[in-house]
Image: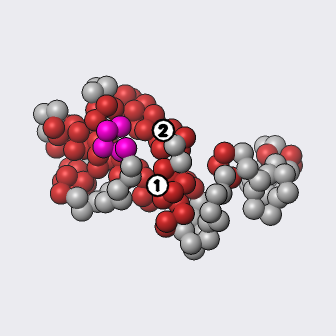
Amino acid sequence: MLLQPQEVEVYYVLPAIRRELAYALKRRGRSQAEIAALLGVTGASVSHYLRGHRGAESLCELAALANMAAAHVTDRESMLRETQAILTVLKQNRTICQLHERVSSDIPKGCDVCFGGAAVGSPTGKMDARVTEPVHGTGGRQ
């Protein structure tokens, strides 16, 4: 099944990031209730992360990134900022690409669509201008 890169992030990467951040914050003395509030999840979700029942995908470098990020997390906004910083690193070092190839059998080796490579079915990788311009009053349809 072909998964979009964003689906890989939502289904696999974000839960793994939350798991590692939960571990790191717990080691820094935060309670499960505090961790839940910072992550924007329930206490039960934090319990699942800490017991390894959720976010089980193992990603290279993630534990180290989460440990560094946890030092900067003081509130929900800083949690969002640190989560986005981790996602940026995982995209740039192509960790997400490697995971995408593992979980989606239709991804060709060496795919670089997320990095400006040619899109599937498009010789240039450029979207048609009429697709990128806003469409008003048509409910998004042309």
Tags 1 and 2 in contact by the CB under 8 Å rule?
no
Nearest the camera: 124 or 37? 124
Residue 133 vertical position relative to residue 78 in the rendered view, above or below: below
Residue 128: % across, % down: 85, 51
Q: Earlier in the sequence, mark 1 or mark 2?
A: 1
State the separation of the CA atoms marked 1 and 2: 16 Å
Look at 65% across and 65% down and name the residue there. 108
Name the foreground residue: 132 vs 83.
83
Q: Which amino acid type is shown beneath numbered disc 1?
A: Val
What secondary structure is found at the residue carrying circle 2? Answer: helix
Residue 69 placement (x, y as % from top left): 33, 32
Question: Is residue 44 left or right of 1 when viewed as pictured?
Answer: left
Task: Give coordinates of residue 38: x percent, y percent.
Answer: 29, 37
In this view, 65 is above or below 117: above
The residue drawn where x is 73% and y is 50% is 117
For the record, the magenta segment spans 61-65
Does residue 68 appear in this view?
yes
Residue 89 shows which numbered tag?
Answer: 2
Dominant secondary-structure state across the stretch colored magenta: helix
Q: Quadrant of residue 79?
A: top left
Q: Is residue 34 left or right of residue 100?
A: left
Mark 1 vs mark 2, foreground winner is: 2
Q: Is residue 139 left or right of residue 86?
A: right
84 up-or-down from 119: above or below: above
| Residue under the image location 23 percent in, 39 percent down | 24
Element at label 1: helix
Type of residue at label 2? Val
Query: Which of the labelled discs sits on residue 10, or is there none?
Result: 1
Q: Residue 49: say if magenta.
A: no
- Could you tell me which quadrant the N terminus lies in? bottom right
* The one of 89 and 4 positioned closer to us in this rendering: 89
